Amino acid sequence: MSVKLKIFAAVCIICVAARLAEYHFQENLTQPLLAKNVDVQSGVPAETSANNNYPPLERLPDSTDMALAPGRQLLASDPSDKNGGAGNFLLSLCDSGQFQLAFQFASEAPSDLKPGWLKAVFTRWAQTQPRDAVTALASVEDDSERTSLFQTITGTWAANSPATLADYAKSLPDGDDKTYALNQVVDNWSLQDPEAFSGWLNTSPSGVNLDQAIAQLISKTDEANRSSEVAMQWVECINDPALRYNALLQILGQWNQSNPAAAQNYVGKISWLDDPQRQEILKSLQNPPLAMSSGNGD
């Protein structure tokens, strides 16, 4: 074989190898798009949230445009995403930790898809990087959209780590965002770890009224969720006198059924009750209505 022929053959082999490598890269990039049954509204596959039925993107081009090109092509060919390909691509970006890319792609979505896609991105982002997710909201210009996404982040954050959300909320200026974040802390931390939550309440940030949140919390919990002693610590953190008094009566009514001596003894130690209130409460505990004493309405 002549030297020229050998060189020609070698060049052909190199070209074929390069083409195969390019095809393999594109196959890896678009493979996640083939998965079905993805619920982009919630950000998880419809069939399972524990074992995703699509793999994350392992490699991405350096260029943002190149990285998002497959998803954009899918949207161009299926603007309503009836086949779920573009939504699946979005979730694959999230699974790869490419949240900024996922955020950009979701922001480009058609108006009927955009809210659900953004919610999916920020739900997943908040599961692993909640502070980064909140920081990214600075680029959201629409106030109602930003508020909705902030609530998505803090709701997810509170479910996973209410203590760290409580710490973050301290840095927020007084206002709706701070109030919402702290209410999420109340709803989640109180049930996950009542004792730790009670300790936090004693040092909770000033400037935010948690009275309603604590009162509602007391109204929807009982001794199956927390002890009466812990609930009394929550009562002590309510500033509004009427709300605090009503919450006290509710807890005492439950406590008096399980341990009347402890409940009545506690009443004698409450410093903010005046004597007429104390005597009235003790009388009602010692002579409870039939419904209270029997535990039902019979």
Image (cartoon, rainbow, N blue to C red):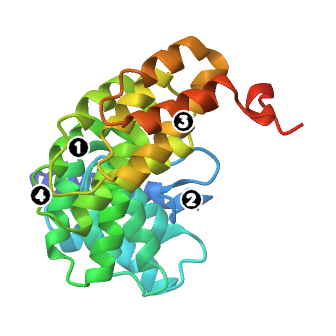
Q: Which residue is mark 2?
A: 38
Q: CA distance from mark 2 to mark 4?
A: 55 Å
Tell which tag, 2 or 1, sits nearer the viewer: 1
- Sequence-wise, the earlier of marks 2 and 3 is 2
Tell me residue 30's x, y (percent): 41, 60
For disc 4, the neighbor class at 10 Å (few under 14, some 14 to 19, many from 20) is few
Does the rendering let one see residue 159?
yes
Q: Is residue 187 left or right of residue 257?
A: left
Q: Amino acid at mark 2?
A: Val
Which residue is rendered at x = 44% and y = 44% of the image? 245
- Sequence-wise, the earlier of marks 1 and 3 is 1
Q: CA distance from mark 1 to mark 3?
A: 38 Å
Quick one: 121 or 98, which is closer to the camera? 121
Q: CA distance from mark 2 to mark 1?
A: 32 Å
Tell me residue 229's x, y (percent): 43, 21
Q: Amino acid at mark 3?
A: Glu
| Mark identifier at residue 4 | 4
Q: Amino acid at mark 4?
A: Lys
Which residue is rendered at x = 15% and y = 75% of the image? 139
Q: Is residue 284 left or right of residue 264?
A: right
Q: CA distance from mark 2 to mark 3?
A: 59 Å
Tell me residue 179's x, y (percent): 27, 60
Q: Which residue is mark 1?
A: 166
Q: CA distance from mark 1 to mark 4?
A: 74 Å
Q: Amino acid at mark 1?
A: Ala
